[in-house]
Amino acid sequence: MTDSLEQVLRERLQTLEPAELDIINESHLHAGHAGAQGGASHFRVIIASKQFDGISTLARHRLVYDRVHDLMPYPIHALAIQAKTIA
């Protein structure tokens, strides 16, 4: 299931036209955590896009969350985001 979730994240974030996109499943780091009960996953997203140029970190995160909000809090419990501009 986590492989398919990673693919869903990847597909949805393509609308941001990322120059870099890394999706890391960190669910194993949260075993026993209340949010991991029932199989909810934890992911880290590292993304760089020209669409982030000139906007705040909060606005960058909102652009990411707007694309995946329906997946939270289940099947994705947590999403750590590092959103960068293209240097």
Image (tube, grey):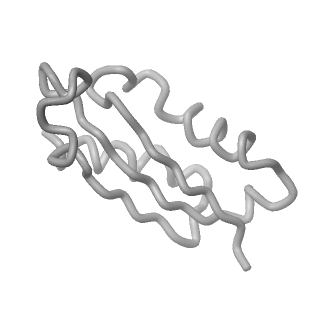
Between residues 32 and 72, which one lies in front from this camera angle?
32
Left or right for 19, reference 21: right
Q: Looking at the picture, how far across and down is residue 23, in whole percent?
A: 36, 57
Left or right for 7, reference 48: left
- Which residue is pictured at 39% across the width and 23% down the height? 72
Left or right for 59, reference 31: right
Image quarter (top left, top right, bottom left or bottom right) of the C terminus: bottom right
Q: Looking at the picture, how far across and down is residue 39, in whole percent?
A: 13, 27
> Would you place residue 40 above or below residue 7 in this image?
above
Q: Looking at the picture, how far across and down is residue 44, in whole percent?
A: 39, 51
> Would you place residue 33 above or below residue 6 in this image?
above
Between residues 3 and 15, which one lies in front from this camera angle?
3
Q: Which quadrant of the figure has residue 63? A: top right
- Residue lying at the far right in this picture: please name it: 54
- Which residue is pictured at 37% across the width and 34% down the height? 78
Left or right for 80, reference 4: right
Q: Looking at the picture, how far across and down is residue 58, in whole percent?
A: 72, 40
Image quarter (top left, top right, bottom left or bottom right) of the N terminus: top left
Q: Which quadrant of the figure has residue 41? A: top left
Count of residue discs: 0
Between residues 59 and 9, which one lies in front from this camera angle?
59
